[in-house]
Image (cartoon, grey):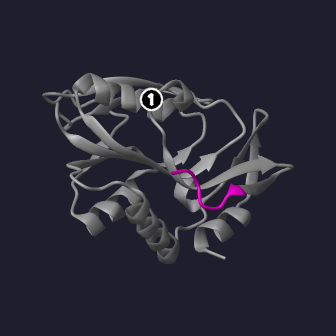
Amino acid sequence: MDQLKRSLLDAPIIEKDGYHYFVHPISDGVPMLKPELLREIVIRIIRKADLEDVDKIVTPAAMGIHISTAVSLMTDIPLVVIRKRQYGLDGEVALFQETGYSESEMYINDVYEGDRVLVLDDVLSTGGTLKAILGSLEDIGADVVDLVAVIKKVGGENALESTDYDAKTLINVDVDDAEVVIVDEHGDG
């Protein structure tokens, strides 16, 4: 059994306001992230993603950073982090993200018209964050070459379904009766 699948099956489940969350090192930073799990994920992303002619990796803060940093180190593709803090730098673009459990503004710098980007994130659940990011990248005039999320949580509404984008995922899961259920161990794409 691979590291990602095993770690998800062993993940604790918590309930907040009737919503069941799995607590996982990739999506939450706890329990600790073991190097062999991160290594496996990065190798699988590199094998699955279309990286040809990608100029930049784009990821939202905070839980996409460690994955995207490792992919950047392995591919020599520069990394842009979409932040929750505004700095007011030239070319900064604000976006509004709405998920199943929060709303906030985020900010993009260093992505320009004509840039070819890989959008990379930890978990695709409601799709609200990725939909907002993709819309802002379109407004900038960047070309989204590929979109990859490590884990897809199925079973609810997904805002990406109303877009022209299909996310590739490494594994698809659901939370049923307070446990993680592997829906597709190979993910989408």
The kind of secondary structure the magenta stretch mainly shows is loop
For image coordinates 82% across by 48% down, the residue present is 176
Q: Compared with residue 119, is residue 170 higher up or lower down, i.e. above or below?
A: below
Question: Residue 186 location, x and y as percent?
Answer: 59, 60
| Rendering quarter of residue 11 | bottom right
Q: Is residue 56 magenta?
A: no
Question: Residue 45 location, x and y as percent?
Answer: 43, 61
Magenta part of the protein: which range? Answer: 183-189
For image coordinates 46% across by 29% down, the residue present is 131
In the rendered structure, the answer to whether residue 120 lies left or right of residue 32 reads: left
Q: Is residue 187 magenta?
A: yes
Q: For numbered disc 1, what is the local secondary structure? A: loop
For image coordinates 43% across by 50% down, the residue present is 64
> Which residue is denoted by mark 1 in the rendering?
164
| Rendering quarter of residue 141 | top left
Q: Compared with residue 100, is residue 65 higher up or lower down, i.e. above or below?
A: below
Closest to the observer, 49 or 111: 49
Question: Residue 50 location, x and y as percent?
Answer: 34, 54
